[in-house]
Amino acid sequence: AQQSGLASPPSDPYRAFVPNPSRDSDTLPQTGVQSTDGAARGPLDGVSIGIKDNICTTDFRTTCGSPFLQDFQSPYNATAVKLIRQAGGLIVGKTNLDEFGMGSTSVFSTHGPVINPVPFLNGGSASPSDPSLMYSAGGSSGGSAAAVAAHLCDIALGTDTGGSVRLPASYCGIVGFKPSYGTISRWGVVAFANSLDTVGILARSVGDTQKAFDVLAQPDPNDPTCLTREHRQTIKKLHHQSTKLNELRAKWTSTNLSGCRIGIPKEYLIEELNENVTATWRQGIEYLRQLGATIVPVSCPHTRYALSSYYILAPAEASSNLARFNGLAYGEPFTKEMEAMQRSDGSGEPTLYGAQRALGFGAEVKRRILLGTYVLTAGAYRDYFVQAQKVRRLLKQDFNSLFQLADPLAILEEGGGDAIGDAIRRPEDGGTRVDVLLTPTAISHAPTLKSAAGALDHTSDTDTNADASASVSPILAEYVNDVMTVPASLAGIPAISVNCGRINVTDGSPTEKLQLPIGLQLIAQYGDDTTLLTIASALE
Ligand code: GLN
């Protein structure tokens, strides 16, 4: 190949983008709105953008990483996609993901696992050919994170239901932002768990993140859960009632956080936390202190129930959402495969619905459907679904008791009046409240693809075996990755992961000298996304 002089490296050795027949010279690049006269047409003019493949586009298929939708072409663009194009952004392709966004390592994709580009950047070997250097890019927006980290695009959209933007951002050493629920329209985003789903932004800097956020944070009558213009104004008003706090916050920059109060919730210091992550967390705390912030130890007592609550509520909503995939309404039915699928057990022809779903969904998605359907059954509903909803409310109350800004949604619900007076509690409460919380994003650096794929191979769970308790099931181990990110998702509040350096790889792999990125997470009150981004810019 070298002799021919054509040995240019493949453009995407990380499987960051999904293969797409529409992604050819006819449709790429999408320059329809790009300026031809050199004048910027919009704030994203000429910026290359990857779109997670569960967000609908007319120019590319939208596969959700699922066999079910391998040929699905959406007849419309998601609102987020429309806004990006209007702002001059160039959509370069659809990014790989865990099927329907379900996963934390981007190995559950019909397009194959995403490879973390970090070990191959900065003068490493040019293409990921060494299996001992194969690490997960995180999930489920792993393709978006890998594409941005490897400079295959400037910015990427992901979706974050329980951490799917923040976790891959941490593993790939970039910024991952999940805005307040309802800030960016979900119209055209394939639903996983509606009450948790958000569109998130992955970028190499907080500045780029902010730029995309300004374009995307718009009302949308097509999405009833998207904040209206009036909502946005009211929230802003409620949050800006204290002149004293406004004046203080106006002075914060990426190099000055004087008077900023940063809470460190002790419940995030869990046994599973890698010691190098704890050290990074400490450094982050020290760094923010040097910029003038006051560090406040705080407590979110219900954090320990968040993960279980999430893995009841998210599958419950998913099982309902995925009922629409019946082989008739979306994508092509598996006609040939069905013909070949003759029951040998004498029960006759498989039903259309059953066969389509058996063929169209991967193992993890099936697991979620079973789990979700179970927790919604009459017999289990009260013990699981209702309990999980209660935990969700308690988590929200934990957060509300910590932030100096009150929850604007609670105030809107109560109809204003006296409650508005409560919107700002500082400094009368004795100064125990904080502006943001700082936690790790993940319990460790990226896992190897091999260990991540352990969950993939684990198609039939063996937890019913008597000796299963001897080791944690790879499925459960995968779920534990989300422990730091799900609380903010359940509360609907904004959270961002910012890269805070690299830590030594400690999984006993032969690549002992390898260091992988790790992020810290900042969490803020609902609607306080701008403050969150300012403080994030100081941390990066
Ligand atoms: N890892 C979590 C899950 O599998 C979160 C996924 C997401 O945020 N889309 O459900």
Image (tube, grey):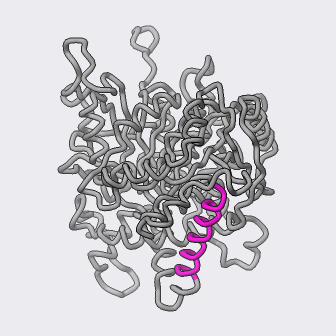
Residue 392 falls inside the magenta stretch: yes
Residue at x-position 75% and y-position 55%: 298
Residue 481 makes an appearance in the image: no
Residue at left 71%, top 49%? 263
Q: Give the range drawn in magenta.
A: 384-403
Left or right of 64? Residue 405 is: right
Height in image: 314 above or below 117?
A: below
In the rendered image, the vertical position of residue 78 relative to residue 87, given as above or below: below
Q: In this view, does 37 lie to the left or right of 244?
A: left
Residue 12 position in % (x across, y down)? 44, 29
Which sits in the foreground, 178 or 511? 178
Residue at horizontal 76 percent and vertical 75 percent from the top: 467
- Quarter of the image for residue 531 reads top right
Residue at image location 67% in from the left, 49% down from the top = 434
Res 258 quadrant in image: top right
In this rendering, position of residue 187 left or right of residue 207: left
